[in-house]
Image (cartoon, rainbow, N blue to C red):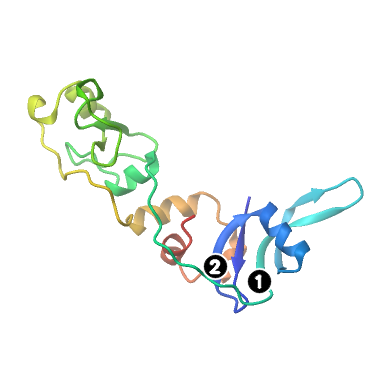
Amino acid sequence: MDVLVLTHAWRPLRRVSWQLAFQWIFAGRAEVIENYPDRMVRSAHRAWPVPSIVRFVRRVKQRFRPRKITFNRRNVWLRDEGRCQYCGHGVPSDGFTYDHVVPRSRGGQTSWENIVVACLPCNQYKADLTPEKAGMRLVKTPTRPRKLPARGAAELRWRTGMPASWRDYLGSVAWWTDALET
């Protein structure tokens, strides 16, 4: 359960866990703007509503550093724009397979430069061969992405349960995915 954090000037900053938000609230660094209507944290003698949105009371220094995009199944699918890299057909985010361009049995590594999205028929056809030996061509050469496409990220992020109360503080879904990737 995430909490949206606003700056002292009411600008969205990031998402954090409810536990960290509670630490800031009890330390007096943040104030609660909105609570989840159906969530409570209980102790032996007291209950507190779980915050949905908190705001820092004073100005905070923001350190911007480029984020390294982690290698995972979702990010590979986003990099390849949800398309099989052999036939070009779209594949759903929950129904695709990884394919090692250079098979692991031939020394291929599991890395950005050697993994592509493949539909099941193409992956089975290629089997344990290189694309050249299987007579297949890649749509594009796999590389480490600098940025992921916002369209796919927005669709995935929106489905993961952004609370409706956050919409008033976020300009658009595109802003949400670009600025709050944590």
At x 60%, y 79%, the residue is: 9
Q: Is residue 166 left or right of residue 108?
A: right
At x 23%, y 46%, the residue is: 143
Image: 28 above or below 75: below
At x 49%, y 50%, the residue is: 159
Q: Which mark is residue 119?
A: none
Q: Is residue 64 left or right of residue 125?
A: right
Number of disc labels: 2
Q: Is residue 45 left or right of residue 58?
A: right
**Residue 15's x, y, as percent?**
57, 59
Q: Is residue 166 left or right of residue 84?
A: right
Q: Which mark is residue 13?
A: 2
- For mark 1, what is the residue? 56
Residue pushed farthest right? Answer: 45
Mark closest to the chain's N terminus, 2 or 1: 2
Residue 107 seen anywhere in this rendered image of the structure: yes
The image quadrant of residue 36 is: bottom right
Mark 2–mark 1 Cα distance, whole angstroms, equals 10 Å
Residue neighbourhood size for the residue with mark 2, other residues' Cα within 10 Å, grouped as few (<14), some (14–19), many (≥20)? some
Disc 2 to disc 1: CB gap under 8 Å: yes
- Mark 2 lies on a secondary structure that is strand
Image: 4 above or below 86: below
The image quadrant of residue 24 is: bottom right
**Residue 4's x, y, as percent?**
60, 62
Type of amino acid at the residue the image marks with label 2: Leu
Type of amino acid at the residue the image marks with label 1: Phe
Residue 35 seen anywhere in this rendered image of the structure: no
**Residue 3's x, y, as percent?**
63, 58
- Mark 1 lies on a secondary structure that is strand
Image: 181 above or below 112: below
